[in-house]
Amino acid sequence: MGTKREVVVGVDVSKDSLDVVVRDRHFVLSNDAEGHEKLVRRLRRYSVRVVIMEATGGYEAGLAVALSEHDLPVAVVNPRQVRYFAKSKGHLAKTDKIDARLLAEFAERMDVKPQVLPDAEQVYLRELVDRRRSVNWMLVDEKNRLSKARHEKIRVRIRDSITKLEVELIELEADIDKTIKGSAVYSEKAELLQSVPGV
């Protein structure tokens, strides 16, 4: 059996999807537990040096935690750093999408190192992400119930429930964002860029 090829994996994260580049292969997965598990299975084929993604207001947290739990090396970087890198290459950072391929190139050129989440921090982030996922599911269920409910008193109750869930979702996303920004693991220093010509 041959030696696994070492790869840098770029992941462009959005609320609902993951655009992934492994070497020259590009594929899209859902940004949920099922998509995370599929990515883990695919990456088992390689010797992964680092999986790089941008901090995107918490949408990357679930994937970062899932990869870490499977001992896959992860780096979550500040989007500003990647945009500066894109600008140094002649990309229009304000209009061009920072995609997975560019992230992988950034990781290779800047020799980005994987980060290790402290246990307590990892557990808290995982639970925040799990709770956000549950609240999203409950919101979908309640909205479906509202569309079918006929009696106004029941509709009022369901609308109240939806409002409370929406408020909780906002609070959860704020907590995820705050936890990530307050983490030394996720905090990337802009000084790293000063050594890059043209930045």
Image (cartoon, helix red, strand yellow):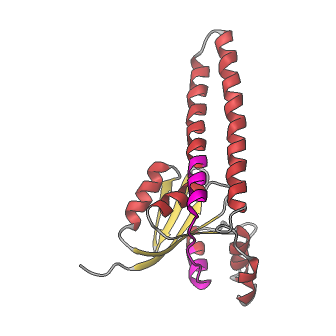
Looking at the image, residue 93 lies above or below residue 195: above
Which corner quadrant of the image does residue 86 belong to?
Answer: bottom right
Q: Looking at the image, is 13 positioned above or below residue 10?
A: above
| Identity of the residue drawn at 73% across and 76% down | 189
Left or right side of 2 for 76: right
- 19 falls in the magenta region: no
Q: Main secondary structure of the magenta part?
A: helix
The C terminus lies in quadrant: bottom right
**Rendering coords of residue 106 (x, y %):** 61, 78
Name the residue at 62% across, 54% down: 59
Residue 117 image offset from top left, x and y in percent: 58, 65
Q: Which residues are magenta?
A: 104-128
User: Does the stretch in magenta take in 116?
Assistant: yes
The part of the image, by quadrant, that contains residue 169 is top right
Residue 198 percent coordinates (x, y)? 75, 88
* 65 sits to left or right of 81: left
Q: In the depicted view, which residue is nearer to us: 82 or 61? A: 61
